[in-house]
Amino acid sequence: MPTTQQLQEFTQQVRRDIVRMVHAVNSGHPGGSLGCAEFFTCLYQEIMDYSTDFSMDGKNEDLFFLSNGHISPVYYSVLARSGFFPVAELATFRKLDSRLQGHPTTHEHLPGIRIASGSLGQGMSVAIGAAQAKKLDGDNKTIYSLHGDGELQEGQIWEAVMYAAAKKVDNLISTVDVNEKQIDGSTDEVLAMGSLKAKFEAFGWDVVEITEGNNVEAVLAGMAEAKSRTGNGKPVCVLLRTEMGNGVDFMMHTHAWHGKAPNDEQLEVALAQNPETLGDY
């Protein structure tokens, strides 16, 4: 079991990976990736029960589905550093013939990737299907998914949310990254959604709130609470409050870095704020 310090050091290295990857090809989505670094670190280093001997059937292991696929840099970094594929392969991000496309794909057969998630709004439906398959197979493992708060503006999400509650899909923990920002501005400016907690509860879900989503101890505690609520007839939603661009001061408190790569000078500033801990690729 990793210590808090080890999880923080892992997260710090993941941040280095993210900014280096998007800088190298002047393309990608660093903002949401940086904001979710603690979540992915905790998920793959502590929370989930999985095998790096990857198979698509995923029997007898917890499964994760990334719905907001544009934050692929954080996903790839954590998968590589958790042993799914060589860390050196991060250097191929978004390049021709790379398995690490800008949005995750399955036809490249990259270990750890279970769905193509370039189109927003679809991951919830896939996660629910996987959760129901687990139940039919007598497999008591848990399905995890991650969604952006702006993604919840997609109508398919709410059809899926309604279905999961109606069918008592209670082996599902769906986390929403509530950073209150999307590509064109704040979520309130683009399309205000009101209280997400009230909405999910009204749809029949159990809701856990993690108010410090960029604190590894808070993430671990909140996700443990979410896990304790599974198996009780309701799907579980985790509202994870994060800061877009967290860990790189000039990327924080703005939506501007949703899909923008740092230049050479900005990269050096970002790396200086996140010293190397596990070795760069």
Image (spheres, helix red, strand yellow):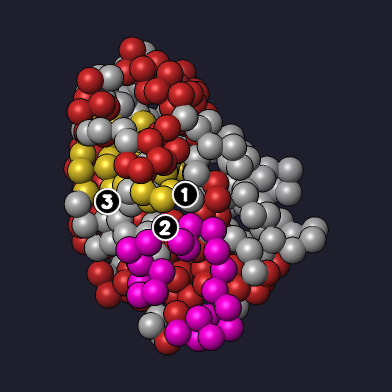
Q: Residue at x 28, y 40 (%)?
A: 238
Question: Are the residues at dot 2 and dot 1 in contact (C-beta closer than 8 Å)?
Answer: yes
Q: Residue 184 carries which label?
A: 1
Q: Residue at x 67, y 58 (%)?
A: 100
Quarter of the image containing the N terminus?
Answer: bottom left
State the CA–CA distance, disc 2 to disc 1.
Answer: 7 Å
Is residue 260 magenta-colored? Answer: yes
Is residue 112 magenta-colored? Answer: no
Q: Name the dominant secondary structure of the magenta segment.
A: loop
Read off the magenta span: 246-269
Q: Mark 3 against mark 2, which lies toward the viewer? A: 2
Asked which quadrant contains residue 40, the reply is bottom left
**In this orientation, which residue lies closer to the viewer: 120 or 136?**
120
Mark 1: amino acid: Asp
Q: Mark 3 against mark 1, which lies toward the viewer? A: 1
- Judge the density around disc 3: few (<14), some (14-19), many (≥20) Cα neighbours within 10 Å: many
Horizontal side of 186 relative to 200 (left or right) equals: right
Q: Is residue 172 visible?
A: yes
Q: Which mark is residue 241?
A: 3
**Residue 238 versus residue 17 in the image, above or below:** above
**Residue 61 versus residue 262 in the image, above or below:** above
- According to the picture, the residue beneath numbered tag 2 turns out to be 255
